[in-house]
Amino acid sequence: MSAHRPCNIRRTIIYTQCTLALAYMANPAFAADVTPVLPTVSVTNEKVGSLNAPASTGSNLDLTPFQTPASVDVITRAQLEQRGDASLVDAITRAAGISGMGHPGNSGSSLSVRGFTDTTSVMRLYDGTRQYGGVGLSFPFDTWSVDRIEVLRGPASVIYGDGAIGGVVNVIPKKPTRSAIQNEVQATVGTDNTQRLGFGSGGAINDKLSYRVDLSGDRSDGWVDMGDSKNLTFSGALQLDVSSDFRLKLSYAQGRQEPMRYFGTPLINGVQLEALREKNYNVSDSKIQYDDRWTELSAEWTPNIDTTVRSKLYYIDSKRQYRNVETYVYNPGTGLIDRPADSGATQIMHDQTQIGNTTDATFRGRLFGLKNQVSVGFDLSSSSFQHTNNTYFGASPSVDPYNPVPGTFVSGAAYIPRYRNKAEQYSVFAENRLELTDKWSVLGGLRYDHADVSRADLVSGAAAFDQKYSNVGWRLGTVYNIQPDLAVYGQYAEAADPVGGLLMITAANSKFDLSTGKQVEVGVKQSFWQKKGEWTLAAYHIVKNNLLTRDTNNPSVRIQVGERSSRGIEGTLSMAFAPGWQFDANAAILRAQFDDFNDSVGGVAVSRNGKTPPDVAERLANLWLSWNFQPDWTASTGLRYVGKRYANNANTLTMPAYTTTDLALQWKATADTTLTLRGYNVFDKQYFTTAYYSGTQWLNGPGRQVQLSVHHRF
């Protein structure tokens, strides 16, 4: 790879922003001093559903979920406040067909959607921007600063690139508005010595400037021994409405997490014991810390009602530190928990940076006399990831399962930078929506992605590899409105996933191409009962090819011929079925399996064809019911069901299905002050969120928790 290429990418990114600014200044209206108009606010007693609300995640054409030939869910700010999920993953998994599988190795953020798992198949975005490389996301993690969460299930590569065959989740923060300045503060106390505080403020400073600032922090003793945690996050944005058709926004977000230093509980003779539910086998001086910074300068130009140009320049800096004993294995001979010296003592530093630019333009007009929308754009980024470690070797004595003496971290291996991966990525994309009639539209999209990934061995000083990857993803979909509020749709899409996180990919795996996938989806969406109710139903089939599998003739060798697939049905229902009552529910049923996949067991290739991939729940459901039984009082309850999941490819280790129940009682003491008493997992159900790398080490979910919050606006 040319030594000048990273500089060229960076220059191109900066040049793009300057070009956009110059193009705007060339507009004759630039000098006009036009005062932005405050938006009109309408008040209605009807429930306004999410199907007809704007959503940016399903398309670059500013379509609503009702207009999009795909499954798009929107979790609104009102729903976040009603359900009380402070953890972002808890909030995301209220959406249909999504389960969490977070552990410290993936920064606690990984998800499972439609039979596909982890950051190389389920993409997470922050305000439409992805952190490249599939390393694992540690930001955002808190919902206080979130305006809404948009979920697109199924391949999303046409919009966001490789790594989204399962779906994409877009976390959209609160933003500046042209309304009067309003402030808010919320304080929470609860079990496990939980304390949480949030402050937010936003509004118009003058006729040109508006802002939004959010700050939140929390701490807790946790639900396991040595389970203490503390987190702090800040997000802020300043918007300049230069004129009625051009605005600039500078955003900055920062988060620091010190999460629970907990890596799960090992199986004892093949089962999990209730008596070990709160035990932690890490060392006493263990450490996990994530520090993230996201900076963005964006511009939006609407020279006329039919044209919108958007561009954003961003910089992301993430550092993740680990010093832990992570592996625990029960020894039936001694009755102790072994902490193997050759795999468990882990000291790691991730140092990841990314600079990028995304620019797109949308045009509305007519094609052959028919209404037409088209969007074209490009994406550039330059990323670097340095991995510092101790080769995962250290001395950690075995401990008693019931009364572990944690000890301290000991490793004689050098903790030094081992390798640095770099990625220079660019893509071009286009979408088009043609309205064939007032009821029938067709949507098509195309994207070309190219990445140059290189690795330097920092110990030897040699270049390990330099590989190029490219892919063309596309989709074709249609929506037909049987009635104004009833639509059927269908879509075919092709996408790609890397065989591993590109910024951590090894020299051996770098030689393999991207895995490819295709999906067929059909569905129906309806808003009914004067928009007081909505329901959706979707059926899909996804096939992912070119997986890494063991060669049957030589199991020590990986070959890229594997395949896995999933098919399923998802449904959602939301309705205000009586005065004061609101009901929201969703469910997913799927069948996921390996179609062509081998493991190496004792040096022999063993077929896993027909087996379910690990961490995939084939039955999922969520329910939320609220009742405003008095003018200032609301009672709510929520159920979360996650079906059984397997902890290994052989499907011999099964994490059982579980249902948790949440309760809430809210009192609106004044027009500006609300008190809420919440109970999470009120029946204290023991359940397991995921298995750690070995498959025999499961992470317990939190037990019963009670929290009291007060929220005040001023």
Image (tube, grey):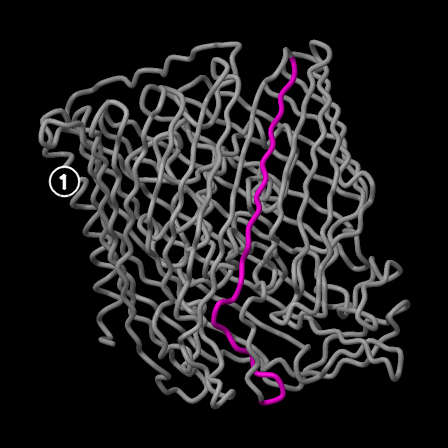
Q: Front-most of 438 and 54? A: 438
Residue 468 position by quadrant: bottom left
Q: What residue type is labelled 1?
A: Leu
Q: Do we see residue 213 in this rendering?
A: no
Q: Front-most of 231 and 543? A: 543
Question: Disc 1 marks which residue?
Answer: 22
Dividing the image into 4 quarters, which one contains the C terminus?
A: top right
Q: Do we see residue 606 in this rendering?
A: yes
Q: Residues within 10 Å of mark 1 (few under 14, many from 20)?
A: few
Horizontal side of residue 353 vs 655, given as left or right: left
Magenta region includes residue 601: yes
Region of the chain picked out in magenta, as a range: 580-603
Magenta region includes residue 155: no
| SS at circle 1 | helix
Residue 190 in the image: above or below residue 282 = above
Q: Which residue is drawn at 48% across and 66% down?
A: 351
How many marks on residues? 1
Horizontal side of residue 618 vs 366, given as left or right: right
Horizontal side of residue 523 vs 592, given as left or right: left
Q: Front-most of 206 and 298? A: 298
Percent from the top left, x then y, of residue 156?
A: 37, 49
Q: Is the magenta stretch mostly helix, strand or loop?
A: strand
Percent from the top left, x then y, of residue 541?
A: 44, 52
Residue 73 in the image: above or below residue 220 = above
Residue 48 in the image: above or below residue 340 = above
Q: Front-most of 298 and 208? A: 298
Q: Which residue is drawn at 26% across and 43% down?
A: 311
Dividing the image into 4 quarters, which one contains the N terminus?
A: bottom left
Percent from the top left, x then y, of residue 480?
A: 32, 30
